[in-house]
Structures are given as C-alpha cells and as structure tokens.
Amino acid sequence: MNDILKMSATDISRLIKDRKIKVEELIQIQFKRIKQVEPNINSFISTNEEKAMIKAREVQELIDQGQLRNSNIVGIPIAIKDNICTKGIITSAASKTLSNYKPIYDATVINKLNDAGAIIIGKTNLDEFAMGGSTTTSYYGASRNPVNNDYITGGSSGGSAAAIAADQTFLSLATDTGGSIRQPASYCGVVGLKPSYGRVSRYGMIPFASSLDQIGTITKNVSDTVALFDAIYGNDGKDSNMITNQTFSMNKALASDIKGLRIGIPIEFMDEGLDQEIRDKVNDSVEVLQERGAIVEEFHLDILNYIKPVYYIIACAESSSNMGKFDGIRYGKDLANGEDLGLEVKLRTLFGIYVLTKDNYYQIYEQALKVRRLIKNNIDNAFTKYDVLIGPTVPNIVPNFREFEKDPYNINTSTKYTAAANLAGIPAISIPCGIDRRGLPIGLQIMGKSFCEEDVLRVAYTYEQAIKKNR
Amino acid sequence: MISLERIKQDKYEIVIGIETHVELLTKTKIFCNCSTQFGGKPNSQCCPICTGMPGALPMLNEKVLEKAIKLAIALNCKVSNISRFDRKNYSYPDLPKSYQISQLYMPIGRNGYLEINNINKNRIGIHEIHMEEDAGKLIHEDVNTLIDYNRAGVPLIEIVSEPDISSSKEAVEYLEQLRYLLIDLGISDCKMQEGSFRADINLSVREIESEKLGIRTEMKNLNSFKAVEDAIEYESNRQIAVIENGGSIIQETRRWDDNLKKSISMRVKEESNDYRYFPDPDLPPIIISETFINNIESNLPELRDEKINRYCNTWGIPLCEAEIIVSEKNLAKLFEETVKITNMAKEVSNWIIMDTMRVLKDKKIHINDIKLRPENLAKLIIMIKDGKINSTIAKEVFDAIFDTNLDPVVYVKENDLIIVENKEILREKINAIIEENPQSVEDYKNGKKKVITYLIGKTMKVMAGQADPKKTSEIIKEILEQL
C-alpha cells in the first residue's frame, strides 16, 4: 500500500487515466496514511474525507467517460494551505480570528484544480496569517518535521511541506511571501516552487503582503511540480497584477539538458553566516550541474545585504493594511481582549503601522520602495549574464524545537536568501541537495528570470535526474 | 453699533475651497461587476470584492478611468501619464476593508480650472481630481445600526478646487457650472438628493490684504445649492463674529442643519489624523498614453460654454437667452431642432424664453416632461411668418398644443382660427365700422392719425381677432383717404 504513496503524482495520474487504479481506492489509502501519521506531525488544520470521496466518485465517472485525458493531476490527492479560500470549507489562516470562517467563494487556483480533476483532501497548517518561518505560531499548534519529529518544519507553509514529506498527500498548494514555500520545503526535504509574481492568480489567497505574495507548489519531485504548476498558472481576469498572455511548456521544463546554460552564484549567498555543511552541499550540487555542461561563475550582488530590512518594511506595511479588517468587528469577535490574534501578527501589524505614518512614509517606506527597485534592477542586471542564479535556500541547518524556542527570531534570518525572489518578482525553487550532520535535509535554491519558470525547473529537473543516477 | 454686514464687507474676505464628490454613471462598480443602481434591496448588489472578503482582489472598471480622464480634460487639468491608486486606511463600520481605495500621490488630473462666468471669464482653480470608491451606508434604527453595502464600491470622482472662491454666490456659480459640465459629459446625473453630487465647503475668513489664511472649517451635509448659499453665509458670519469677539476659530468638521439653518460641530480635526496612505499593491500603476487621451478628447461632446458661444455667434442669440436655453438639455434640444427646420433662431428663442417657460410655470410641468415636438413648434412659427395667424392667436395655439403635442396646422383649421385673408369681406366689415364712427373720419382729416389704431382694434373685435393686422391697416387707410 505504501508503495503507491511513494510514487510520483504524474505516474499515478497516468495509471488512473488508464483505469489501473481507482480514484476512490487511492483516496482511501491516502486517508489511512493521514490518520496514521497525523498525531505526530500535525500538518493539517482540517481534512474532509467525505467530501473527498464524493469528488473522487465524480472524477472517476468522468474518467470512465474518457474525459480529463489532458490533465496530468487527475484523481490526485492535494492538500491546500489554509490561507487559500475554499468555498464552504473553513479557511482559518491558522488564526483564531478566522477559526469559524467559511468563504462563500473558491480561490481561482481551487477552481483550476477542480477543473483538472484533482481531489482536495484537506487544509494544511501554517504560521498565523503566513507570518513566520516555523509553523509554530498557528492557533492549531505547531507542525513537526516528518524527518525527525523533534525538529520544526519551517514555515509558513510548514503543513504543506510536512504533508508531502510524510506521504500524507501527493501534491500541495502553498504561498510564499518571503520564503514561505522554499524554506519549509528545504527543511522537510521536498520540492517547493515560488512562481513569478503575476504567474498564478492570487484571487482567493488571504493576503499577507500583496506585492510579495505568490501561490506556488510543494511536491515530492520536480516533475510533479511541473504538472501542478501547469494546472494552476495563467491569467484569470481577477488579479490586476497578472499579465494577459502567458505560456508555459512542460516539455521545456522537463528537458534534462543544461549544456551551455549560464549559472551565476552570488558570492554574498555563500558568505559568512552560512553553515559550512550547507556551503559544501551547495558546492557539490554546483559541481553536478557543471558536469552536465553548465557554465558556472561567481559574482557580487552587494545589494543582497539590504534584502532583509527592505523586505520587513514592505511586508509589514502592506500587511498592516490587509489586517485592518480582522479587528474583532468584521472578522473575529474578541475585540476587547485582543486575543483573537497572536503576538507575531500583532508585532508585525504594529511595525507596519509605524512605517506608514505620515512622518515615516517618506523617511522609511518610500526609501524601502526605492531600495526594492534597486534590488530588482541589480538582479535583472545579473540575468543579462546568467540564465539562473544558484545558492542555498537557507543559511542555517534545521533547528529542533528546543533550539528554536531559545531564539525564535533567529529563524527570520532565513529570509536573507529567499526574500530576494519576492522583492524582484522572479521564480525560485528549493530542491533537496543532501542531509546535514543531524540527518535533516538541506535545500538548494535556483532562481530564474521573471516568467522563465521553464529555466528554473529544467535546472532542478536535471539535478534531480543526475542525483538519481549517481545513487 | 456697526452691523456685522458692514464689518464683513469692509474688513474681511472669505476664502472658500470646495471638495465635490460625484457618483459616476457607470453600470457596474469601480472594482467589481456589481450593479450601481440606486435604491436596490439592501445588500442585494454586492460580492466578495466590494464587501472586502478575505482574498478578494479589485479589478479597475475601465469606464471609470475613461470618465475621469474626460472630466480632467474638460476641467483643463494636466492628465497624469502615470496614475496610481492608494489605500486610505481608517476603520469605520461602513468601510468593509478598513481602507478606502482612493488616490493621493498620483491622482488622475491636476492643475486645472473652471470658468464660472461667461462675461468675466472668472477662473476657479482645480487643484486635482481623483478616483475612489464609495463606502457602504449606515442605517440607524432604534437600538441597532444596519449596514447596506450596495453603495460600497460605487465609483466616485472627487474634484478639489483651489481656495479661489470668495462668496456664496461664486460658490453656487462654481457648483452649477460643474454640474452642467458633469451632466453634459454624461459623467454623473448629479442628483444632490440621492447623494450623487455632494459638496463639502472649506471656509476661512481673513482680514482684507492679510497674507495669511485663516483657520478653516469643513462643512458637510449640503443637500442643495440653497443650502450651500445659506451655509456659507452662516459660517462666514459665525467665524467673523468669533474673531470680532476676540475668539479664535478651531479647525473642525461641521454639519449643516438645513432645518435649523445653522452649522453644528461634528468633530474636531486632530493633528494626528493619519490615514497611512500608501500605493495599493493590488492595483498596478495605470499608464495612460497620449493616444488614449487624444482619443477621449476628440470624442468629447459639445460643452455648455461652446454651445453658448455657438448660439450667440452663429445664430445671434443674446447671451442671457443662450444661457437660459443651454441650462437644460431638453430646452437646448427643442431650440436647436426647431431652428434647424425654421432657420429663425431669434423667433425660436423668444418662444422658448418667453412662452415655454411661462407655460411650464403655469401648468407646473417639469422641463423633462415637455411634449411639444420641434416640428410642431416650427409649424407654428412658420404660420405666423406666412401671416396665417397673428401673434395673439399663436399664443393661444401654443398653449393648446404645448402639453398635447397636437399639430398646430390641424388645430388652427379645426378651431377656425386662420386669419381672414379675403380682402373683400374685410373691406365690407371695415366700411360698416367706419360708418358707425363718423367722429374718427373727422379726426383723421384733422390729422389725428392715431384713429387708425383705434379702428384696427374695433375691426379685430368684430372679426374675433382673426383679421390680418397688416391688411386691416392698409384697407382702413385706403377708405379714409378716399372719403
């Protein structure tokens, strides 16, 4: 039974389309697994087996009628981060404020998944309102790393990453504002893609910071990422920041050929502050890519030092405005005690309010916007020389709960490498590239030009294939 | 004791700036596809977007942008090549997102003006115009307050004037002129009662020739032009009285009470009132090309001032008459179409200024309900020109056809009103009249030519007004000369 759960989503989907596996059977197996490991991991805020089974029967009928032949994720279980709106299903954003909130509409990505015949099995855990990098600030308790339950999953999409790592689902959707997909993917040893800004509609995602937020994917491997991304990208006419005509070629993304591809390694990504073991693993990975014909070069991207402050100013400013409606009047009810919201959310909101006040707007916020523009220009400039940029996903090895609780804000340093992609709006992926001295996964980050997901995925796929062979 | 009126005139000047909020005539809201229709069942015209549900995103209605650019051009503004929406953050129950999408840093138009007087060409500066969304409506019951979100997200344009207005008269002229413009452009129906045209008055007073502006107050809830006038009179007097009595004005928002005819303090503006404006990340900057602007400009309808100029210069209508005619779309239409048929602009203008207005008033008909068609008014005017009826009868016919839209030719025939044109019949009657009035023959021979008028009157009486005055006069002269 668990053999099936180890398979890739695209392979299973093929078997389902060929009617070698029944969707209902697969869903039943999946739920058995969820129940088995959920007490140790706590990756879900809610699951709904009944609804999933109804949907499974509907999809099976369509398959029996010969429909959905073009979908690569038909009949596949998928877990959704609980800050993406699902009609009639509680969407809590892991906050007490929204613990009873049932949206009256589906997010665009949910509609797309339904059209593709994927089966939504539940809603995954996250840091409250996606603010955090640990999935410990959830109203529903922390998620635990499936590799070793003493360790944190990272976050904010810790539930989605853990569910994949624990074989509780084949596919998952997550969101990434400063690294919330890539960092937990790195911690849990799975594949996390943050697409370009404007690639996947944000309509129906409870916003954290609107100009940085992006819905993306967490899966077991790169080909599943490609299949899932292919199902959810594209303009829906509901998100003003999307570009009208978008194309994506699965074949180009899954071509295992990087001969002549130019890879840039920002020296500042490999500098002090980076764990030596991670540095070694990243260097090993780069060698693998070099062997495959890529041209690798180190270069300076000084502007990276400004990423963290700029990121926090912009993210908190936007979120302070987005959080305005969760005031205990419109949503939530505990206005007097203010206990509907957790400390982290309150701190970020206050900081955001502070940087937007009349006096600070020009002094702080507008300056941050200018530096953001500078960061983007610098990164765009790097892409005139390189096709992709490569580095570690996070500077530190995965902390265990004890270590994390001792120094919870140290986790924020992990934003250092990931937030650049959000500020510049470019696609970035984290793929596993080894394990550390304590047996926890290490992630490799690959960033590409805006709207060039194909390049990023091709490099990731090539690496994945090469490692498989080496094994 | 010197009266306040004298002090006001001699010592102080009033400085007024007006912020006007106009609801746009678009079918759908500014950021979603909900209807903007007025008067719907509460909360029947809303969706996740205009009620600000978590995760919903705005999409700009292009029609709003088009209308805003139209207005910016008509108000002689510089249209921004890049415009942007900002969030104005404040928490109020009628504001579902806890912020209003508005424009602060890069409004759609800046630095324009509006001419408020056709003779003096007095210009009132327009500081800026910007687009924004309306809030919901609070309905206060005994204990509860209910919220109707039908109005949330209805598109608004705010027009901010410079403080160039110096009297209640000017303020009303400015608002009237602005209203004409908005209606002509099809931007708004400007119904003050329904709230689709709302003006807030910023007013301060200062001693004449003083460099420094006084502290201003903002007045809201002005539901008619009369209220604007009254409120400005009241508020300027109040401020002068405060200063004359050694007090000082505090910056505050005041609400005009039209029943009490006074303004009442609503809230004192605190220094710390901070809306934390910042660019809305959900809406990318709007890039407006010159071609787009030119395209809108070349399709602008004829504006009031252009119309007045055309009436005066091409058709020779006096300015005061032209102003009355263009003041209402229906009058202008009746006028222009009748002139097209008759080519007798002055005559048509007379019928509109004098008789149309008279009948509307007498019969209490609204201008929008005029039934009289231009073809029939034209027929009437042509009958007069051809001498088929005289002006007295014409008025009678006009009154009869005005609210029935009967064909005046048919009406005249059926009611036997055509002037007697047969000279022989006329001569017979006149002979008889002259025989009955020998004294007039004597008078005429003694040089009193006035008797002709007297005899015309007599003839008209006998003929029940149906005699052609010109012919009557000729025949009388003829007979008297022969005697």
Image (tube, coloured by chain):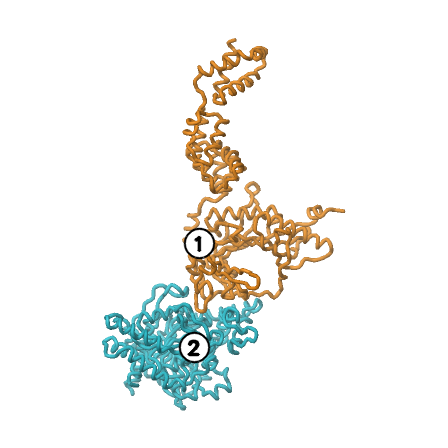
Q: Picture coordinates of residue A327 (x, y %)?
A: 52, 71
Residue type for callout 1: Thr
Residue at image position (73%, 56%) is B246
Is label 1 or label 2 in front? 1
Q: Are marks 1 and 2 in contact (CB under 8 Å)?
A: no
Residue type for callout 2: Gly
**Protein chain holding label 1:** B
Packing grade of label 1 (10 A; few <14, some 14-19, many >=20) is some
Q: Picture coordinates of residue A401 (x, y %)?
A: 46, 87
The answer to whether B339 is drawn above or below residue B80 in the figure is above
**Quadrant of the rendered structure where residue A264 is?**
bottom left
What colour has chain B? orange
What colour has chain A? cyan
Residue that label 2 marks: A179
Residue at image position (36%, 65%) is A235
Residue that label 1 marks: B26
Residue at image position (50%, 57%) is B130
In the image, A211 versus B218, the foreground residue is B218
**Protein chain holding label 2:** A
